[in-house]
Amino acid sequence: MALLSRSAIIEPLLNGTKKALLASGVQESNIVVQSVPGSWELPIACSKLYSASQVQSTSSSTLGAGDLLGGSTSDLTSLSTTNSASTAPFDAVIAIGVLIKGETMHFEYIAESVSHGLMRVQLDTGVPLIFGLLTVLNEDQALARAGVASGSHNHGEDWGAAAVELGVKRREWAAGKIS
Ligand SMILES: Nc1c(NC[C@H](O)[C@H](O)[C@H](O)CO)[nH]c(=O)[nH]c1=O
Ligand SMILES: CC(=O)[C@@H](O)COP(=O)(O)O
């Protein structure tokens, strides 16, 4: 079991993800971060959290400044500049975790189940669910993907960008727009 310094990996990944979201014009107030005990809990957390955003949306009488993408469709330069948080359902969900192989089959079972679980949540809800789950053989591999190792790339930045791209595309597709 390798539960050592998961926060040393998750925190940089989360920061990289947020950096990309903000760089795309997403308002900070529309980025919701929730934590779970481990990667095993990611599918149910993503599922229930997305449901919560839908409940919040239908039970709210006032629409916020916009959703995750600030009310934009494809033009991210026209984002609202107000700081109030949206009550609209989430445009995208990003599941971030790291599984580090230990001595037993634990890693294989969790990696396989969580991957399938996240895909199921994505297709069942119809909301883009970005796969930010590192499945690595050792901590060094994780650090090299979290942008912590010298000269390495932070994969969180890719996940943030993917969330915005799919969030925008999903809206367009929902409106029958195929560009
Ligand atoms: N070994 C790793 C875990 N294990 C914990 C499980 O995800 C789960 O929280 C527990 O079994 C209770 O249901 N989680 C990780 O995220 N990464 C690991 O490497
Ligand atoms: C179920 C467990 O937490 C444990 O058996 C996992 O062990 P390992 O990570 O060494 O495979």
Image (cartoon, rainbow, N blue to C red):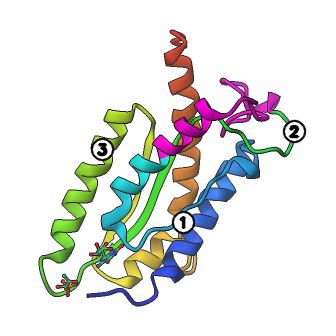
Residue ID for mark 2:
81
Q: Do callouts 3 and 1 mark residues in contact (Cβ within 8 Å)? A: no
Q: Which residue is drawn at 57% across and 74% down?
A: 11
Q: Residue 153 carries which label?
A: 1
Please state which amino acid type lies under the numbered disc 3.
Met
Left or right: residue 116 versus residue 18 is left
Q: Between 148 and 150, which is closer to the camera in this rendering?
A: 148
Against 165, residue 49 (above or below) is below
The magenta segment is 50-79
Helix or strand or loop: what does disc 2 sit on?
loop
Left or right: residue 11 versus residue 118 is right
Against 59, residue 119 (above or below) is below
If you read the primary sequence from the N terminus, does the residue marked by circle 2 or circle 3 appear first?
2
| Residue 164 seen in the current view | yes
Left or right: residue 30 versus residue 128 is right
Mark 3 to mark 1 CA distance (whole Å): 25 Å
Please state which amino acid type lies under the numbered disc 1.
His
Q: Which mark is residue 119?
A: 3
Quadrant position of ligand 1: bottom left
Classify the position of the C terminus by image quarter: top right
Q: Do callouts 2 and 3 mark residues in contact (Cβ within 8 Å)? A: no
Helix or strand or loop: what does disc 1 sit on?
loop
Q: Which residue lies furthest to the top in this view?
A: 176
Against 121, residue 170 (above or below) is above
If you read the primary sequence from the N terminus, does the residue marked by circle 1 or circle 2 appear first?
2
Q: Which residue is drawn at 37% across and 72% down?
A: 38
